[in-house]
Amino acid sequence: VEGINPRTLSARLDSLESQGIIVKTPTTSESRCEYRLTQKGQALIPILKDMHAWSDRFAPQPVLS
């Protein structure tokens, strides 16, 4: 993922996995793995969509110069 320190990303993914939100599965490549949402993680999707809609509605609009 571009723009995030690899250690930070790894720590966040580990945290999400320990909370049961994602599950990590190995791939055919030795150095790679894939993550997917668990049922618990999928249950967060409507909440995140609502938060995004709220932000679109109420976030301050940038000032155009």
Image (spheres, grey):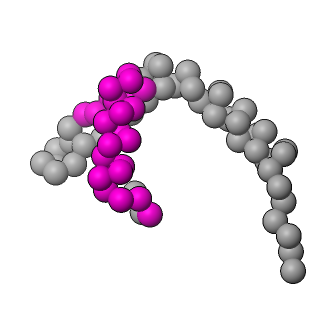
Query: Relative to residue 62, is residue 17 drawn left or right?
Result: left
Q: Eyeballing the image, is 10 above or below 37?
A: below
How many numbered markers are drawn? 0
| Magenta span includes 4 | yes
Q: Residue at x 70, y 36 (%)?
A: 51
| Magenta span includes 42 | no
Quarter of the image for residue 61 reads bottom right
Quadrant in which the N terminus appears: bottom left
Q: Residue at x 35, y 39 (%)?
A: 13
Query: Relative to residue 56, is residue 1 drawn left or right?
Result: left
Query: Relative to residue 17, is residue 58 drawn left or right?
Result: right
Q: Which residues are magenta?
A: 3-25
Give coordinates of residue 11: x percent, y percent.
Answer: 32, 43
Quarter of the image for residue 6 reads bottom left
Q: Among all residues in the image, which is located at the extreme left?
A: 30
Q: Residue at x 39, y 32 (%)?
A: 16
Give coordinates of residue 32: x percent, y percent.
Answer: 22, 48
Give coordinates of residue 23: x percent, y percent.
Answer: 33, 29
Give coordinates of residue 65: x percent, y percent.
Answer: 87, 80
Q: Residue at x 44, y 63 (%)?
A: 3
Q: As rendered, which of 23 and 6 lies closer to the eye?
A: 6
Query: Relative to residue 6, is residue 4 drawn left or right?
Result: right
Q: Eyeballing the image, is 15 above or below 58?
A: above
Quarter of the image for residue 49 reads top right
